[in-house]
Image (spheres, helix red, strand yellow):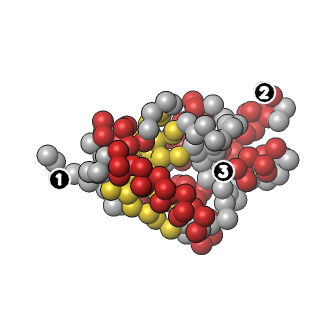
């Protein structure tokens, strides 16, 4: 057994926001290796496909040497974590609603694999109101999203608008 601390931060990242990037950067300082997993969420309808999300996310975290982006479509995070020898699941919290949701996930994850702990990081104040779903709404109405997302997302939105006229 290794003493390496390995984290897995998961989400749909549709699209990745600056709040996500801040949490990823902070979490990367806590682990020898941090995986950022783009996971399918059956509760959320996607704007970007998995390849577009991965591209935007990889660009956004490119300077974080111990961060790797992975994708999983029909897997539980706790199962992927076990395969990657993850020691901790990392979750971001914006508010009390997020805590309630995440505590429920942690309950089941712990039942499925008691050896993997979950840690929570609070969103920085300036990102607590930013969510991917709100960003998708702004994209739909052609509002400026540049204050809330990495440049890679702005470029992908521009490209998508040229191709599909969203």
Report the residue at 46% width, 65% height from top: 121
Mark 2 sits on what residue?
Answer: 163
- Residue 42: x %, y % from top left: 60, 37
Cβ–Cβ under 8 Å for marks 3 and 1: no
Report the residue at 61% width, 53% height from top: 17
Can I make out residue 65 in this image?
Answer: no
- Please, what secondary structure does the residue beneath circle 1 have? loop
Left of 35 or right of it: where is 131? right
Query: Of circles 1 and 2, which is in front?
Result: 1
Left of 115 or right of it: where is 131? right
Residue 41: name its quadrant. Answer: top right
Which label sits on residue 128?
A: none
Q: Nearer the viewer, residue 146 or 129?
A: 129
Residue 140: name its quadrant. Answer: top right
Can I make out residue 61 in this image?
Answer: yes
Residue 35 vertical placement versus 119 (above, below): above
C-alpha gap between disc 1 and disc 2: 48 Å
Residue extending farthest to the bottom is 125
Which label sits on residue 132?
A: 3
Tell me which label, 1 or 2, sits earlier in the chain: 1
Mark 1 sits on what residue?
Answer: 3
C-alpha gap between disc 3 and disc 2: 21 Å
C-alpha gap between disc 3 and disc 1: 35 Å
Is disc 1 surrounded by few (<14), some (14 to 19) or many (20+) residues within 10 Å? few
Tell me which label, 3 or 2, sits earlier in the chain: 3
Is disc 2 surrounded by few (<14), some (14 to 19) or many (20+) residues within 10 Å? few
Quarter placement of the C terminus: top right
- Residue 28: x %, y % from top left: 38, 56
């Amino acid at each position: 057994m290794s003493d390496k601390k390995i984290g897995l931060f998961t989400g749909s990242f549709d699209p990745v926001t600056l709040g996500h990037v801040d949490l990823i950067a902070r979490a990367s300082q806590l682990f020898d290796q941090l995986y950022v997993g783009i996971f399918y969420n059956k509760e959320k309808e996607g704007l970007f496909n998995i390849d577009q999300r991965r591209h935007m996310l990889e660009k956004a975290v490119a300077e974080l040497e111990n961060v790797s982006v992975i994708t999983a479509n029909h897997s539980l995070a706790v199962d992927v974590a076990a395969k990657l020898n993850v020691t901790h699941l990392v979750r971001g919290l914006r508010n009390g609603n997020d805590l309630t949701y995440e505590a429920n996930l942690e309950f089941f994850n712990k039942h499925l694999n008691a050896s993997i702990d979950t840690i929570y990081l609070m969103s920085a104040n300036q990102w607590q109101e930013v969510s991917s779903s709100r960003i998708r709404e702004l994209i739909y109405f052609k509002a400026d999203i540049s204050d809330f997302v990495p440049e890679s997302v702005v470029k992908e939105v521009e490209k998508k608008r040229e191709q599909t006229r969203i």
